[in-house]
Image (cartoon, rainbow, N blue to C red):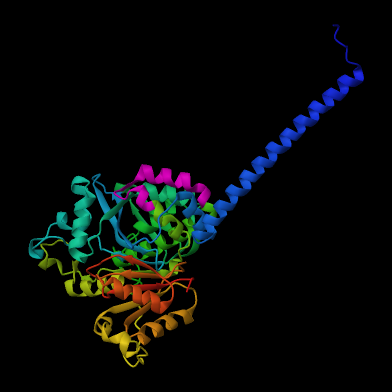
Amino acid sequence: MKKKQMSKKDIKNSENRKKKKKKNTWKKVILLVLLVLLVAGGVFAYKVQQNGGGTSGMLATVLNTKKDLSEIKVLLLGISTDQDNVELTDTIIVASYNPNTQKATLLSIPRDTYTGKNTARATAYEKINALYGRKHRPDETLKAVNDITGLGIEYYVVVKTEALIKLVDVIGGVTFNVPIDMDYDDTSQDLHIHLKAGEQLLDGDKAEQLVRFRHSNPDKYGRMTSYPAEYGDNDIGRMRTQREFIMQVVKQTAKPENIFKLGEILDVAKENVLTNIDFNVAKDYIPYIVEFNTENILTETLPGDVPSLNKTNNVSIFVYDKAKTKTLVQELFYDRDIVETEGTEEGAENTTTSDETTSSSTSKTDVTIEVLNGSGSASNLQKVVNQLQGAGYKVTRTGSTNTTAKTTIVNKKNVKETLLKNMKDVIGTAIIETSESSSSKVDVTIIVGKDY
């Protein structure tokens, strides 16, 4: 049978139907893609919100970071090379950062700190700044700092001078108020420092000049000037400038626009930084650091003095004061996050019934509780304290922490589970966690969250 030939009209209609079908197919594909993107975007936005929202929430989601982080302590060593090509630590700083309270501490260790046993027979090799140069082993300096402070620091970061120069240039310079005119030249190290006092934008080269300055060139009478006494003379002044400059570098590096320079920053770190901090540990702190306020940094210098040369074998050394150091370390690293509340231990009316207290009142009064406010509402802190005291518990400390979603009861000293559950019932909402610490001054820490 002869096949019927299609007319031009039929062919055109057939082509139009195919085009329409193809167009409808593409519409379906586009709609499906949009739907997938909307769902994925919604899930991502939800996770960002769950992680605290904003830049930090976005980073926490992208990096898949952990929550409930503990304070981290790090030894920072700034390395430069002297005229004999020996690497010395010009900068020695103990840094701590607590993501829960958003507070940090910088403790400078004078580079001439004596680490030997007998000051009368002191040698330059026993200064703390010489320990790294012996074998390029930061763990020796770390051990010496731990012996001095008793902090048990695990991590170190060794930063070469080149790293500071490149980092400052990568982030577009750092605005800083140079405290005094600085003029110094050392041809043996090819070091030339010429800066005018006042606020200015420092590039990498000027940043190096700033942190390495200690005193000026001698005048025609051979006298050298340094920082004024009220600022901190010589090394004390330099350490203060270094700490304040580090604060500004952190602040300006953490600007949102520098997130897009993260690759360059990491490249600088890979080439010029030696550390034992695993990236998987470091990345968890990134979302918190971008929200960090440098006004929360507390800075100090190791206490001690410089004995006369006739008592130290003609070697200029710094001898730290053991008693004052112990007190300072306690204040800086252990007590600063706690705000004592007067009248929380006594005077509260016990509103529990006799049935409630017969079996557990003794245990309740034995438990010491610290309450930290992370709810964003000042009144919530006192409400929780009143509830706990009314139930027969002893609240010995109160303070604040960064905003957190969930109210949490943290068992620090092996408190009975029945008591922890009772605290939860008293407050009305909470999750219970265990994080035992022999050094904790309280048995239980309660963090009041936004869900309270």
Q: Position of residue 52 (x, y in %)?
A: 50, 62
Q: Position of residue 64 (x, y in %)?
A: 44, 51
Q: Is residue 47 left or right of residue 334?
A: right
In the rendered image, the vertical position of residue 269 relative to residue 198, given as above or below:
above
Observer-nearest of 153 and 404: 404
Q: Is residue 337 visible?
A: no
Could you tell me residue 116's position as x and y percent? 12, 60
Residue plotted at (21% across, 75% down)? 324
Point 23% across, 70% down: residue:
439
Residue at the spot 55% in from the left edge and 56% down from the top edge = 46
State the extent of the magenta-drawn residues as a range. Answer: 259-282
Please, is residue 280 above or below residue 419 in the view?
Answer: above
Query: For residue 93, what is the image quadrant?
Result: bottom left
Which quadrant is home to the N terminus? top right
Q: Say if residue 119 shows up in the picture.
A: yes
Whether the magenta-drawn stretch holds residue 173 is answered as no
